[in-house]
Amino acid sequence: MKRIFLLIIVICAAITAKAQLPGGGGGIVGKISGTVIDSLTKKPVDYATISIFKSGAKAPINGVLTDEKGNFQINNLRAGKYKITVSFIGYPTKTYDPVETTASKPDNNMGALVIAPSARALKEVQIVGQVPLIENRIDKIVYNAEKDLTAAGGNATDVLQKVPLVSVDMNGNVAIRGDQNVRVLINGKPSGATSASLSDVLKTIPADQIKNIEVITAPSAKYDAEGSGGIINIVTKTKNASGISGSVSGGVGTRQNNGNINLNYNKNRFNFSANLGGNLTWPQTSSTIFDQTIQTPAIPANGTNPAVDAVDTHNFGTSSSRIKRHGARGSLSAGYEFNGFNSINSTLSLNDGGFNLDGSGINTRDNNLDATKSLEYTSNSLSHNKFQGFDWNIDYTHKFKKEGHEITISGQWSHSIINTDYQNTYTALNPSQKGVNDGKNNEYTAQADYTLPISKVLKLEAGGKTIQRRINSVYDIFNTDTQGDNGVRDSLNSNLYDYTQNVYAGYGVLTFTLPKSYSILVGGRFENTQIKGDPKNPFQDPKNPAYQALEPFSQSYNTYIPSLTLQKAFGSNTIKLSYSKRIQRPSLQVLNPFINRSSVQAQSVGNPNLAPEVSQTVELNYNTFIKSSVLNFSVYYKNTKNLIESIASPLTEVINDKEVVGTRSVSNNIGQNNSIGASFFGSIQPFKILTLRANVNVFTYNPTVYDQYLGFVSQDALKTRLMSTMFGSAQVTLPNNFIVEAFGFSNSARRTIQGTSPAFGIYAFGIKKQFMDKKASIGFNTVQPFAVNKAFNQNISSPGFTQSSRTQFPFQSFGITFSYSFGKISFKAPNPTQKKKGVNNDDQIQGGDQTGGAPAGGR
């Protein structure tokens, strides 16, 4: 907390000093205003289009519509010469050039602008400039979700399923090109809640809050080194409006419901925005068949002991679970430009969400040698999971006199609380338990970013950053009777865990803009990481044979991250070659050395000795525009060392005088993976009313396993495997502002060294009607209309055991969506190359949710 207060004092002092500098008034922003009048009627012309250009330029930089009294006002203009055009149906466009504002007179009231109707009234022609659904920029792919009609009524997970190169599995885990080590940001900044369960947080964000999603597969050195798969940045909606504007949207359906309200105020040098959205699912019931065989090998007789026969223990179960989710997210943002050189912005984001799970099952256990050990029993489970927190950041920017020369100082405090309580009861065999897990996460970030255009050819970017993470986890576990009562503390499994991670980083990037449309981006980043973990169990008796003697652990390591991008543009074609190096630090979830026995037949434990994954990627990309179509092709090679995967092995142990036979999974650096891949995405318009889009990514999984882990895998698992993600959509624009869209995607099964995770695919249809000059709309969406459930199959095997599960989860839904926008909104287009300011913590491997209960089992 002291770090944040110190940062605020430094920023405020810097602001005060800069605001008092002489000559600072030269950068004051002002406005241009006036009134449009009809030359014949002498009446004001409402809804006339006012466009503003740099004097002599051809492309507008902003624009507004006149109000019912013919008045207009364009704010946030720096001193300079501009061109103003006035256009309206039936009137020739009238141009005023130059229209000048100065530092001494920043506001220019043009008075009455008189326009005369043409001799022949023009037939009504409507020209609408649209942002494409998919954009390919120099360093990222942008998916403009607000242009996607089938996204309405869903959540962030639903939108991500349609983003090029991105895939989402049945549990909401996100991957880029098949790699789940992805860092997800919201408005360029991390959310503290994602440190515990990214998939759950994404399901709480209504799709109507999302403006676009950026995918960065080869981040430059200015980005944090973490996230071997890449970076996904979810940008929420804001409107650059003069005055007050906003929107209301939502959806009601058979699977989930959501709502969102957005309010914006922007005048002269001050801007403010507020957003509130929520998501609520109806209870959804899934069913699972679980089949596990544990093989204990035979032991031949020796001089002392008799022979022991091989034993097969077979665990089989059918279960059903009912899950209900809820979530809400709100934000308040404000910014102020003191003058043309100094500005400050701050955002406070709040989140709250969770899910409840209620399940039951019928189970059997068989033993091939001892029929008395075969029995049938029932199980019941309850789980309540809740997460909440906030992210507060503040950014101060000072711009120097030279265009593009600036420095930004930023700070952020992320705070999250995760609470889980669960109860698992069994009528026989397995021990019944209650558990409570309370987690707290505080993350403090400070950084500075500096940009200097040295010449027309060369630009320098440099900066420094520190992230200080403080995580605390308390696990209280109690053994109960078969009804879940009479709890007695389980001293073996109850634990406390304190975790500290400090990251210190500095970077430098050079961008060369060369003749003949060549450009080069080269950079380097150095990071130092310091980790400390302190596991404690004050309830254990050291004399207990099962006593776990755990010691505090620490790690410190340095990482150098180079990056290089070469690009050549020729006409409407671009070819790009890039190299990037990334790391993936193991997080709390995979480092925690305590054994998680919430599912006694499928236990898990962390490994405090894990090293970070290190990946290196080389990619060749080609992009072309053909009239209204865009085509993008890539081939890439990726090498990952210290690959982190979970290895399960057979286990027999006694808990509360009950023999438990199952598996225990441990995260390990199992080896390395060499992957070759190719991707394509494109958008074509064969007819004026029809747009077709497709996205295909194919890549290999080819692990090389370290010798010490070869005994846990079969040779078949080491073969090269081909995996893929595919997406396709079609959109038809009909008369009277009707739009129809259909889409579908398919993700192949994912391989690990011990098996496969489920394949996943869905299809959907939607129709939307716009009215009130496209300020309002109503639509209908359906997902999986011809099938209620989706099947997900998972298989794991190694010497000593085989395990499979088959889950049926309901995905079918029907829903109605609506939206309404109000206020007079300008059409200022954001600069696509503008660097995002502020905190950008794109790091940390996303582990599963750190809860004591059963997994969510679906969406």
Image (spheres, grey):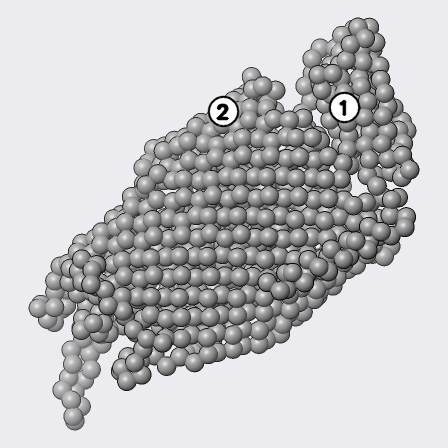
Residue 281 position within the rendered picture, expressed as x and y whole percent measured from the top left: 38, 40
The residue at 40%/52% (across/down) is 386
Q: Residues within 10 Å of mark 2 (few under 14, many from 20)?
A: some
Which of the 4 quarters of the picture holds residue 446?
A: bottom right
The residue at 31%/77% (across/down) is 540
Residue type highlighted by circle 1: Phe
Q: Is residue 572 left or right of residue 802?
A: right
Q: Is residue 415 above or below residue 730?
A: below
**Residue 192, can we see it?**
yes
Residue 236 position within the rendered picture, expressed as x and y whole percent measured from the top left: 58, 42
The residue at 32%/41% (across/down) is 283
Distance, label 1 to label 2, CA atoms, is 30 Å
Which of the 4 quarters of the picture holds residue 114?
A: top right
Q: Is residue 536 left or right of residue 183?
A: left
Q: Is residue 11 above or below residue 272?
A: below
- Callout 1: helix, strand or loop? strand
- Look at mark 1 in the image and give the residue it sits on: 72
**Residue farthest bottom in this picture:** 303
**Residue 676, can we see it?**
no
- Of 8 and 444, nearer the camera is 8
Q: Is residue 604 above or below residue 254?
A: below
- Look at mark 2 in the image and give the residue it sits on: 778
